[in-house]
Image: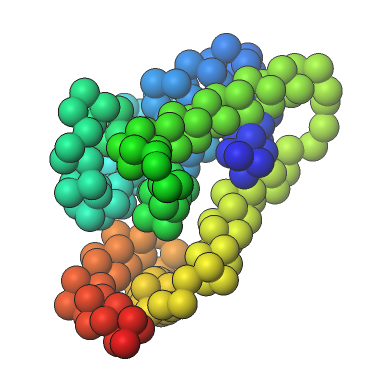
């Protein structure tokens, strides 16, 4: 919850610094709800109108969600009318929570997954609104504030490392990202690294999981 609130507030503050009030922060958080792309959209909105560049940038930034969606298809299959929202709300952090969290005993799993997703978005919207309001009332230097995205991903990684005995996915994710960063460079490594990680986990993930449970 705190991660979403602080991250949303950072987005609202940055958006306000470009002349867009808290209402825009709320609308973007409700209807776009893509943290990384919303931060990128701040630069697109404040720069020249280049629709083709905006479309390509959006495709590049959000293409990683394809990899998130594939392993969640089976879990969302029985969610009926909630399924479209579950697909829409599958952000990086929500994907991480849905993979690691388990419904308490006696609680319907589908309802549990739905409320986790919905609450995540509500926290994000509330943070964005608060950030927009704070930004309109207080003037301060916003340089470096977008680093909160990196900080949040680091916290999620450390949390998963500490709470799971099987570190194979984390090692593959870290190693694959570093390798692709060295090969493709900072501007082009995300999609190759996601493809590499998905391939390695598909081939060896089950075997590693079985060895861990033996």
Give the quadrant of residue 184.
bottom left
- Look at the image and tell me in which quarter the N terminus lies: top right
For residue 103, say whether it is visible: yes
Q: Residue at x 50, y 35 (%)?
A: 120
Q: Residue at x 76, y 22 (%)?
A: 134
Q: Residue at x 43, y 73 (%)?
A: 170
Q: Residue furthest front?
A: 106
Compared to residue 136, the image places residue 44 above or below, namely below
**Which one is in front, 61 or 30?**
30
The image position of residue 212, as x and y in percent, is 35, 83
The image position of residue 157, as x and y in percent, is 52, 64
For this view, does 89 lie left or right of residue 195?
A: right
For this view, does 197 lie left or right of residue 45?
A: left
**Which one is in front, 151 or 185?**
151
- Look at the image and tell me in which quarter the C terminus lies: bottom left
The image position of residue 59, as x and y in percent, is 28, 42
Task: State the scheme by which the image is colored.
Answer: rainbow
For residue 174, say whether it is visible: no
For this view, does 70 lie left or right of residue 7?
A: left
Compared to residue 83, the image places residue 204 above or below, namely below
């Amino acid at each position: 919850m705190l991660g979403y609130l602080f991250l949303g507030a950072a987005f609202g503050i940055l958006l306000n610094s470009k002349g867009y009030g808290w209402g825009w922060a709320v609308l973007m958080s409700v209807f776009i709800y893509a943290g990384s792309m919303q931060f990128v959209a701040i630069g697109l909105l404040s720069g020249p109108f280049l629709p083709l560049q905006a479309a390509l940038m959006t495709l590049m930034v959000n293409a990683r969600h394809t990899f998130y969606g594939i392993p969640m298809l089976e879990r969302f299959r029985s969610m009926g009318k909630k399924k479209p929202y579950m697909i829409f709300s599958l952000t990086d952090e929500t994907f991480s929570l849905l993979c690691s969290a388990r419904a308490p005993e006696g609680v319907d799993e589908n309802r549990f997954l739905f409320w986790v997703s919905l609450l995540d978005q509500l926290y994000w919207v509330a943070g964005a609104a608060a950030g927009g309001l704070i930004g309109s009332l207080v003037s301060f230097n916003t340089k470096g504030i977008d680093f909160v995205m990196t900080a949040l991903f680091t916290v999620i990684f450390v949390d998963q490392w500490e709470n799971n005995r099987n570190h194979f996915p984390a090692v593959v994710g870290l190693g694959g990202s570093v390798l692709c960063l060295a090969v493709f460079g900072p501007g082009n490594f995300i999609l190759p690294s996601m493809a590499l990680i998905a391939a390695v986990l598909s081939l060896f993930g089950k075997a590693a999981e079985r060895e861990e449970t033996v």
